[in-house]
Image (tube, grey):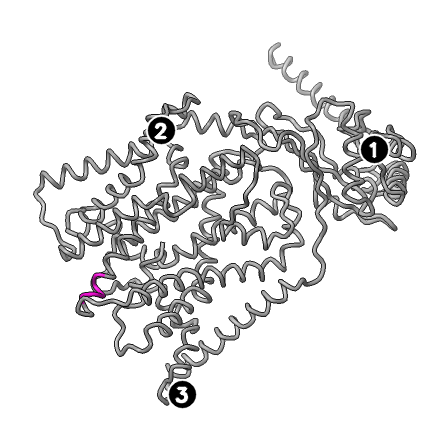
Amino acid sequence: MNKEERYYALKSNSNQQEREVKQVRVINDFESDGKRFESWEDGIANLLESVRSKNPVKNPLYGLERIQLSTTLNDTSGKVADVVCLTALEEVILGASNNSFYALKILDAWARPESGILEGNVRWPGHFYECMGAQGPTVSGQYCVTYMGKNHPEEHPGIPLVMMWGSCFPSLCSQSDVSSIIEILSQSYILPPILSTNCPQPVTGLRSIDIVAITICSVIVTLLIIGTALDLLYLYKIIISQKNKGIEMLMCFSVVTNTKQILSTKQPPGNISTLDGIRVISTTWVVLSHCFYMPMNMLDNAAFSNKYYREHGELQALANGTLAVDSFFFISGLLVAYIVLRKMKKANGSINVFLMYLHRYLRWKIPGIVLMIAVLCGSVAVTAVLSYDMNMQPPSVGFGLLITIAGHVFPTSDPYITYVERYKTDTYTTPWCRIGVYMVGMLTGYFLYVKNGKLCMSKIVTFIGWIVSTVVGILLVYGTYDAVRNTSTLSLDLATFYVSVCRPVWGFCLAWVVVACTSGYGGWVSRFLNWKMFTPFSRLSYTAYLIHLLVMYWYMCTQESMLHFTIENLVYMYLGTLIITYMLAFVASVAIEWPFMRLVKILIEGTKAKPTATGTEIMKTQL
């Protein structure tokens, strides 16, 4: 054995001896600690004791002790905490000093400042479930959240200026008590002014509105059972008597028939199948945009997400996801003109305008109203959790979700809110903002009816048409990226021009796609948009459009911690939201949308010997 081999052999033996010594030390330390940590609860208590800081923001126990609750709260700015609350707090402090597990859970549930503040992490929710799970002999935990900052801060690149601080107090403390104590704790530190403190209470028992919602949902379930049973009895010829109008109305709720019709890939004569693909793509586009924007207030790295958005031009499609909504208006206008003209042709040029509008109104409103009632019914089971929403703070989640669906607008005198409301009423929310693209759709429907869905074009015209529509469509989606990347705003003239023409021009781009594909000049685009698998999903688009926001609210409102933006998380959230949305949309369509659509058709057109339009065509007038 040479010198080098002997050296490495001695070094190996030495390392082995050091490892054995370390293992013995670890075992001895563990045995020594085991004598002190007789239970895992004592271990946690000692761990918490070792990391306590003399900073009330980081350590609520020290803060509560420092301000001398029994006297200070009664002498600070005239803000008085209730004696019952003070007594409960003193019990928590005493319990924490004695390492009582419930008291330690109450204190441990408080929020602490976290890293990543420069990335926008200024919202610290704490631990909701740990707080609510703290149950002592006479004291239980109550989760509260305090908001600090400005009501409506000026726009800032990515960093939310509204700070959030979660806390856990005894349930005997009122919201005003908590607000006074939090204000005292934050007086000596550089923190934004307190906006509000909210301590949402769990919903116990059934409210009147819950009982009404459950009753209506129970009636719907009963109708589904009766309708399905009658359908099966007639299907297997157990009942062979003639169907009357009452039986036909009950059979509208047949789960079997509705499922078959929804999942069918057959296209009725005269159907514009290209619209199925456009409708499905537009729905998924809307969901993707909302998955990117809606969680913004819940991100712990909002500054990074803003920077990532500005540096990656492909995400501009998410910012301009509103064009997907314009696609729905285009489709609606096209089908209204196309179907009405076909009805008038069959009726020798006459049409009952009142019944047409009544049909469309009921076709839209009844499923939406019943769906909102179903949301209330579903909220009975989850309101106890969702009512603790740390960002929205709704008094009732069911009611809050109804507001979301109904799109209510509340007037206010705040100048910032006035600007927001002007944006909603003048450029985005109201239907007349999109009258341009809707009229383009109607012109396209009229054109398809006159030309019987076929238009002869030369290869040069076809080539130019596809090039122009593609380039213009891309410019509408990505043309504003330079301003976004440089965090600048468009000039007033350019912004006015863009907002004025973007929607109707987008409609003309879609019009070319529909006309070219219907006339046989679509190539692979036509084969893709006409794919039969799009047909069932297209029938679910209206319900999916309504439901996807509820799915997102459910996901965000049940999160105990802030979300973290990465592309991987965005994709994961998007796919999960999309799958759950279409699953629920299928259930809602089978149980609510489709039955009421058929029911409305019978009630309005029941006096006619032969319907002038198929059920599928009527449903195509949906968004």
Q: Which numbered disc covers residue 471?
A: none
**Magenta span has 342?**
yes
Magenta segment: 341-345
Q: Are marks 3 and 1 in contact (CB under 8 Å)?
A: no
Q: Are marks 2 and 1 in contact (CB under 8 Å)?
A: no
Q: Which residue reaches farthest left?
A: 458
Disc 1: which residue? 61
**Above or below — where is 511 with respect to 122?**
below
Q: Quadrant of residue 13?
A: top right
Disc 3: which residue? 238
Q: Which residue appears at 27% of the width and 73% of the height?
A: 611
| Residue 170 point in image, percent of width and height | 81, 44
Say few, some or many: other residues with alpha carbon within 10 Å of mark 3 (under 14 / 14 to 19 / 20 or more): few
252 with respect to 153 (left or right): left
Of marks 3 and 2, the one in the foreground: 2
Q: Is residue 24 visible?
A: no
| Residue 308 point in image, percent of width and height | 46, 27
Across the whole image, how many numbered discs are drawn on residues? 3
Say few, some or many: other residues with alpha carbon within 10 Å of mark 1 (under 14 / 14 to 19 / 20 or more): many
| Residue 176 point in image, percent of width and height | 78, 41
What amino acid is at disc 1? Answer: Leu
Say few, some or many: other residues with alpha carbon within 10 Å of mark 2 (under 14 / 14 to 19 / 20 or more): few
What amino acid is at disc 3? Answer: Ile
Q: Is residue 358 visible?
A: yes
**Which mark sits nearer the N-terminus, 3 or 2?**
3
553 with respect to 10 (left or right): left
Q: Which residue appears at 35% of the width and 29% of the height?
A: 495
Q: Which numbered disc covers residue 495?
A: 2
How far is mark 3 from mark 2, CA to CA?
67 Å
